[in-house]
Amino acid sequence: MTSDTARLAGAAAMSTGESLRRIREQRPLVHQITNFVVMNETANATLAIGALPVMAHAPEEVAEMATVAGALVLNIGTLTTEWIDSMVLAGRAANAAAVPVVLDPVGAGATVLRTRSARRILDEVAVAVVRGNAAEVATLAGRPAMIRGVESVGDGDDIGDLAAAAAAALGCTVAVTGPVDAVSDGRATFRVANGDPLLATVTGTGCIASAITGCFAAVNRDQPLRAAVEALVALGVAGEDAALQSRGPGSFHVALYDALYALSPDTIDGRARLTEQ
Amino acid sequence: MTSDTARLAGAAAMSTGESLRRIREQRPLVHQITNFVVMNETANATLAIGALPVMAHAPEEVAEMATVAGALVLNIGTLTTEWIDSMVLAGRAANAAAVPVVLDPVGAGATVLRTRSARRILDEVAVAVVRGNAAEVATLAGRPAMIRGVESVGDGDDIGDLAAAAAAALGCTVAVTGPVDAVSDGRATFRVANGDPLLATVTGTGCIASAITGCFAAVNRDQPLRAAVEALVALGVAGEDAALQSRGPGSFHVALYDALYALSPDTIDGRARLTEQ
Amino acid sequence: MTSDTARLAGAAAMSTGESLRRIREQRPLVHQITNFVVMNETANATLAIGALPVMAHAPEEVAEMATVAGALVLNIGTLTTEWIDSMVLAGRAANAAAVPVVLDPVGAGATVLRTRSARRILDEVAVAVVRGNAAEVATLAGRPAMIRGVESVGDGDDIGDLAAAAAAALGCTVAVTGPVDAVSDGRATFRVANGDPLLATVTGTGCIASAITGCFAAVNRDQPLRAAVEALVALGVAGEDAALQSRGPGSFHVALYDALYALSPDTIDGRARLTEQ
């Protein structure tokens, strides 16, 4: 992956720094209905980048909360039928209020329940961005996938092609994360090569990517492609900074929040390893 | 906020160091029915200060657990109706056993469900201390409040007046936390100016304040005002110590447990920035 | 506890290093139905040692997930009747697929619900390893126990005798953890003296021990005694390494993941403080 950004007509319209500045000024509320494993982590990542997290899943309150939010993030990592019902309720309320919805289909392909639930949400809610690993996205796009639990273990075909095909199939922006990330809305496709291998050693960094996508979507309501790309640039750059402070996954995890908090709107665009495919 | 403690008749009866010593000698059990976001964090804070945490929410066991606890902490951060039912069951059992109850009304004012649930608990359980942010407490006291998700975003009227008014309205001790904290039982009102701005960058530090209030209440069963004030002194001093070891919210979060664990009963009272209003 | 390993006929068959190497090569999936307090922590410990964690508790998917897993870990720390139902479903599916099951009976003895639920799982599922503290294991073995919440507070009779008696009573391998650990299958009994007192200052290190036991069981399917002993050696050695990087429970907790990740298969057997009783 080169860091050549010269030929990027689409990328020229992006500025992670500008969005980051808006997140910190507006402090959008990012409503998250997510899994038990990462609630603390995605809340802290949301706070660190400058937005306000709120976790709320009761059917009596999700519509009310989603309506006033800047973005809604749905994550099926420890799903039950009741939680999926709440996600659909929240998603519809978000749709009615023009609040962008991010879906993280954790483990789609691993069990029938997960695949069906992710599809149900996509059927019943207008999703702005799907953010998943290669196996999860391939499953939703109807392609062969190799998944073990919630980890993608296939070497995968081209990740950019996968993102583009999934975006076309699902009718929304799709972000596929891995050693290199790809984001597509079915027309334009971008690759983000920022990051560090330590990101794969901490549970929930994919979920954190989805939460941060929500933060960027909240300040780019009509530009889900831009939001998804910039979120991955921001997390990737933070991962690079965190790796410099780390002795392993534990210290990397801690340093990641410090790095998200310290991201500079002034320098981040110069550090983006972003290419249009 | 000055650190003048000369005129504090009420404060003279307090000694955070003495209570801290008792917590570490008695190791009280602090039963917490709390939210999914912070369970690990409040458990670790409880352990770090010297008490024993236990999380239990099943209706079949909450009364049994609350009865043998030194304090019960109820936190509605990720509430459902079933969890509130369990909180009420536990709270009544605690009341019957003279176990002090701390309520953290997370997000009261943000949704109808949260406001109603906090009020239901206050109606059905004798609460010793309510610990919340300005917006949550204002909501419960029937005052105007500005809340975004679970974060108080109003600049607020005087926090001491708010605590006193809420204490009078609710008939219990009320602790309002923010850049400066205020605690009142409706007669005496104290301000605690310890702490560090980094506390606001980590999710759940308010919930940690409530858990630590439970620890201090367990060794001051008949003195909820004292317990609430001392808990905020202890957390605030630990926050000051942690900030010295921090590069941002991630490392601050980690250092906070180290600092709670290292708090010295011998020096903490001299560091209290405590004034009576 | 001496580190004399000369007379260990049984221990000669063990090699934590060899198992660790297999975990990192095979990356077994470790399905965990566990408590809300430690989900992130046990997932990260599982990843750090080299295996793949997955948390899934919905009745619709637990059998499917357990069947493809390398091991199943059941932990009743924040149990409800519905979660226990799911644990039994998963456990039976694991049994049918010859997937080893580890049970962590958190708080058995503390409430009727916990004791009954642990016994129900032991009645309805063939468990390979029970991993608990002295009070939990004593409760299940029908011996007197002192427990406060989920912490064992008795000084206890001999931990090796307790492990052996419980193994005989329960018909499976039993690991009792504490300042020194004991593991028995009712015939052979081992003591593991690795570790550091800071392990007791962080919530969920017992749950982490159970998760890591699952990792070792996944690569030693027919040798639960070996798996349980080696898991405690690995965690204990990591705890010793982490303590060198720590200023208190917060930094120890972080360093523990770094240390698990850095464990060397080449040197770990030489560091085992393992004796056969």
Image: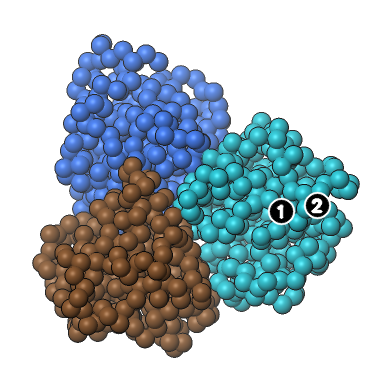
Chain colours: A blue, B brown, C cyan
List the residue tagged with mark 2. C275
Question: Subunit of mark 2?
Answer: C
Q: Amino acid at mark 1?
A: Ala
The disc placed on residue C193 is 1
First in sequence: mark 1 or mark 2? 1
Residue extending furthest toward the left: B157
**Left or right placement of residue C59 versus residue A29 in this view:** right
Which residue is nearer to you in this view: C232 or A215? C232
The CA span between labels 1 and 2 is 8 Å
Q: In this rendered view, identify the residue nearer to me: C37 or C147.
A: C147
Q: Which residue type does callout 2 highlight?
A: Thr
**The C terminus of chain A lies in which quarter of the figure?**
top left
Examine the rendered structure and indicate whether residue A20 appears above or below residue A120: above
Instruction: State whether residue C252 appears in this view.
Output: yes
At 16% from the left and 65% from the top, the residue drawn is B2
Mark 1 lies on a secondary structure that is loop
Identify which residue is drawn at 24% across, 82% down: B10
User: Tag 2, which secondary structure?
Assistant: strand
